[in-house]
Structure formats: structure tokens, C-alpha cells
Amino acid sequence: MKPDESCAAVVATAWRQGLDPRRAVLLQGGPHHTWRLPESGAIAKVWRPGTEAETALRETRIARWLLRNGIQAPRPAGTSAYPLVHSGRYHLQVTFVEDLGDRAPHPADLADVLQRLHRLAIPAGLGLPKLNPFSALSQRIRDLPPGTLSSDQEQHLRALLAAARATWRATPPGPMCVIHGDATPTNCIITTRGPALIDFERTAIGPGAWDQAAAGWRRDIFATPGKEFDEFIAAYGHDVTTVDDGRTYRAMTPVFALSAWLFLAEYTRIDPELQDEADRRLATILNSPLPPFPWRWRPASRAKAEAAMAT
């Protein structure tokens, strides 16, 4: 799916929803495309080709469940909360939600909203899957364009994934709860009603340690200031990176690393400026064993800015 194809889907379905899609801006590419509709105060998400309507609708159900439980989330926008179908070259599902802005949270804000999420009782009726990052990563590797990986590189990555799966199964996961699944600062927005969570495609039932580890991972992989992680754990009240001498945390690291590399490998299809950083991440992962922290990867926004300055 290319940006012009997802934009066509947004334009066609937005008018049907009573939304104005003019001046739509692509916010994120990758498997799914996210567009901002400034004339309507809405965000459109075009789900990857082949996504079922039930999968797209689950995100709306999760947002409504969070709102009922006092956690801010984007409300559906337009005349219907259900995904709209656009059949061009691809059979695409498109959903629309209110635009909550882009005010970034402090680490304590993210910790607070995650802690409240993890304390909620696991609901019935939302169709939440059990956390299983390994099958999704395996599928994403298969879906990469031909030539992205050599046969030796793919074999190495699959061996790393298999070893991570075995370690994960041998590591006590901790208490189960509803987890966000992709608990990064970009998926938390500060609103007038408090911190809000967005983007629930990876929301699942799993150990709260999964969401907590993301903060430590940003410190260790991106070399973000340690004080940011200290603020996070002070607000959350628990440091997953030290539990069981760090075994739980280390069991999750290869999964986070593969996911972060795949995000850029997928994104470079529409933004070639990120290729150098994608290659940098792949080179790190292909080390055996994984190198010690910090890895000093560059976030996508910084990598893109530096590539633009170089040209």
C-alpha cells in the first residue's frame, strides 16, 4: 500500500462519514497509514491490506472501554464508529477518531496512565488476544519486500526470534492484565482531560512488565537520559529492569529490537531517508550475542532530520 492509495481511501471514506479530508497530512507509514484531517479535527487510520473489519473495530471498542473506566482515549469521529471499506487496488478498512493533538507526555504521565490501565480488571467481550509478539514478528519478516534481507540474514533473525521465544517461555511472566502493547511516548498524548492513550492494535492480555520494559528499553537502546527512566519508575513504583537480576527484561529485549528495526524497514518504502538508520539497527541485531547497552540508535524523527541536513 502506497501513500497515494491510502490517501484515496481516506478521501473517499471521509466524505461518506461527513468529514472534510482536504489538506490531509500523512503522519505515519508502515503496515498501516495514519492521516491527520486538519479541516475535521480527526485522525484517519488506513489498516494494512487484508485487515478484517473485526480487527479494526476492536480498537474502537478498546477506546470506549478505557473512557468508561476513566482513562482518556480518542472517541470515534464521523457518523459511524464502524470501519469503512474502500475497494481500490486493495480492500482497505478505514477508521476515524478525534484528533487529540500532539502534546507529548512527561515520563511520569505515561507511567501514571499505564499503571491505571494495568489495575483494571480484564474485561470480557472485547476480544483481546493473549500477548504473542513472536508470530507477528515472524509474519512481518515474511512480508518484507524481496531483497531486504539476504538468506543468511533472514536465517539469523529467525534463529534470534526462536531463541527469544524459548527464553520468554522459560521466564515467569508475572501477573496478567490488559497491556497497551506499544507503550511509547508517541502513543500517549496530553489533553485537557489528562493523559490519553492511542493506537491499540497491539493491546492484549499479558504481563504488565511488557509495557514497563518499554521505558527501560528507550534508555538502553536510544540512550535517552537516565533521569527520564528514573522519573518513570518513580511514578510507576516498580523497576522491571532489576527483577530477577534483569532476566525478565533481557527476555524481552530481542523482541523490542526486532520490532524497532522492522518498523523502519517497513517505513523506508515511503521514506528512503531512513534507510541508513534501518541498516544500522539491522547490523546491531545481527551481532551474536546482542551487544551491551547503550546501542545509541536514533529515533526515526532524528534520523530523518539528520539525513535531510546531510543532503
Image: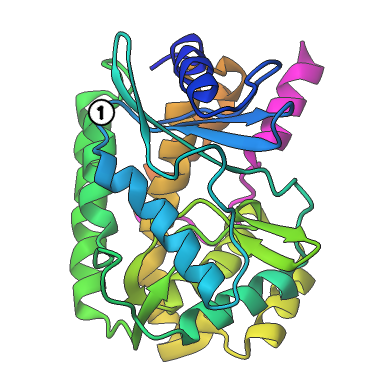
Question: Which quarter of the figure has residue 285?
Answer: top left
Position of residue 153 measured from the top left corner of the image (x, y, whole percent): 27, 32
- Front position in the image: 219 or 116: 116
Question: Which quarter of the figure has residue 151?
Answer: top left
Determine the residue positioned at 32% across, 10% down. Answer: 88
Position of residue 213 measured from the top left corner of the image (x, y, whole percent): 50, 71
Magenta stretch? 289-311
Task: Classify residue 101 as left or right of residue 220.
Answer: right
Determine the residue positioned at 48% across, 63% down. Answer: 64
**Could one spot residue 249 in this view of the protein?**
no
- Front position in the image: 184 or 128: 128
Q: Is residue 267 above or below residue 82?
A: above
Q: Is residue 256 magenta?
A: no
Position of residue 20 measured from the top left corner of the image (x, y, whole percent): 65, 22
Task: Classify residue 8 as left or right of residue 104.
Answer: left
- Front position in the image: 184 or 39: 39
Task: Classify residue 30 as left or right of residue 198.
Answer: left
Q: Quadrant of the N terminus?
A: top left
Label 1 sits on residue: 143
Label 1 SS: loop
The amino acid sitting under disc 1 is: Asp
Position of residue 256 measured from the top left corner of the image (x, y, whole percent): 43, 56
Determine the residue positioned at 22% across, 43% down. Answer: 138
**Could one spot residue 298 in this view of the protein?**
yes
